[in-house]
Image (cartoon, rainbow, N blue to C red):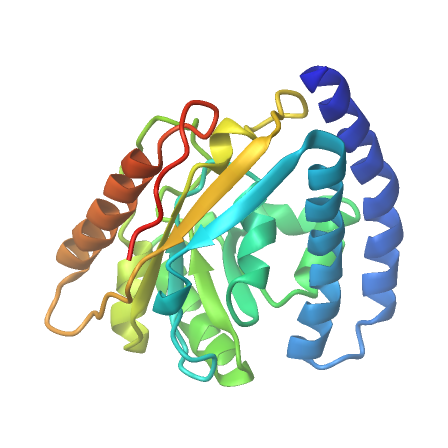
Amino acid sequence: MSELRSLFFALFQLIVTPIYAILVLLAFWLPPVPRFKFITGWCWINLAAARLICGIRHRVLGRQNIPPRDAPHIVMSKHSSTWETLALNFLFPSLAFVAKKELLSIPFFGWAFTLASPITIDRKAGMDAMQQIAEQGRERLAQGFWIVFYPEGTRIRAGTRARYKTGGARLAIALGVPIVPVAHNAGYLWPKGVLGKRSGTVTVSIGPPIRPEGKDMQRLTNEVETWIEDEVARLGNPLGKTPAPHG
């Protein structure tokens, strides 16, 4: 039944994504933030479909830790699923995602993603890549965006860990903005791949902002990693237990 639901959801995405991408392309004339908000309609549709078709719901801990919308921050999140790339858009102000440049070439999705004002990484740029990210980051903050950075660099299997990259901390130090850490257990219910989605409740936990002042990139990265990984471990597998809310 889980595989059948997953397959039906994939078919739904295959139909909806090209249609919505065309609508996004037609909205190219909108200013960056209003255009982004229109694009997130696709995210809402997919989350609603995942709830109705696959039974994937969610709850949020730590809402009180979300800073005022007019105070720019960098969001650093665990990356074990597609779920968080959709859901973060409805927990925080308009977001500019740091992503590899290759995503922009994906038919329909990539074309629309280009109009969502991402911060793109050109891996061929070598040492200049970080400077390019900082320049784009300043531009996005000036436009009214917050920035999302996945410190593991790619999606990893739920229940495992990967070495955190220092790029997010470098960006926070360069821009002088705090980091909001985010943990979740979505990878157990929505793992990488077309099949395998399971019904259940994702718990996402938002931590207090971590300020960069007086810290080098490694110390700041370590502080973010410790909070996220400790919280991910506390949340555990939603198929096995339901974590208690914390203050």
> Looking at this rendering, what residue extends furthest in the left direction?
214
Residue 52, by quadrant, is top right
Left-right relation of 64 to 15: left
Which residue occupies 36% across, 26% down? 159
Front-most of 25 and 147?
Answer: 147
Tell me the quarter of the image containing the C terminus. Answer: bottom left
Query: Relative to residue 95, is residue 224 drawn left or right?
Result: left
Of 228 and 25, nearer the camera is 228
Q: Quadrant of the N terminus?
A: top right
Q: Position of residue 104 (x, y in %)?
A: 66, 52
Q: Position of residue 6 (x, y in %)?
A: 72, 25
Q: Residue 164: image x %, image y %?
A: 28, 43
How many labels sit on residues?
0
Image: 25 above or below 242: below
Where in the figure is residue 46, as x and y percent of width and height?
72, 46
Q: Relative to residue 174, is residue 19 drawn left or right?
A: right
Q: Is residue 94 above or below residue 219?
A: below
What residue appears at the point 38 percent right and 72 percent down from the top-left corner?
Answer: 73
Q: Nearer the viewer, residue 102 or 191?
A: 191
Tell me, yes or no, if residue 101 can be seen here: no
Residue located 54% across and 66% down the image: 95
Q: Can residue 187 be seen here? A: yes
Residue shown at 45% from the left, 30% from the top: 238
* Quadrant hosting residue 21: bottom right
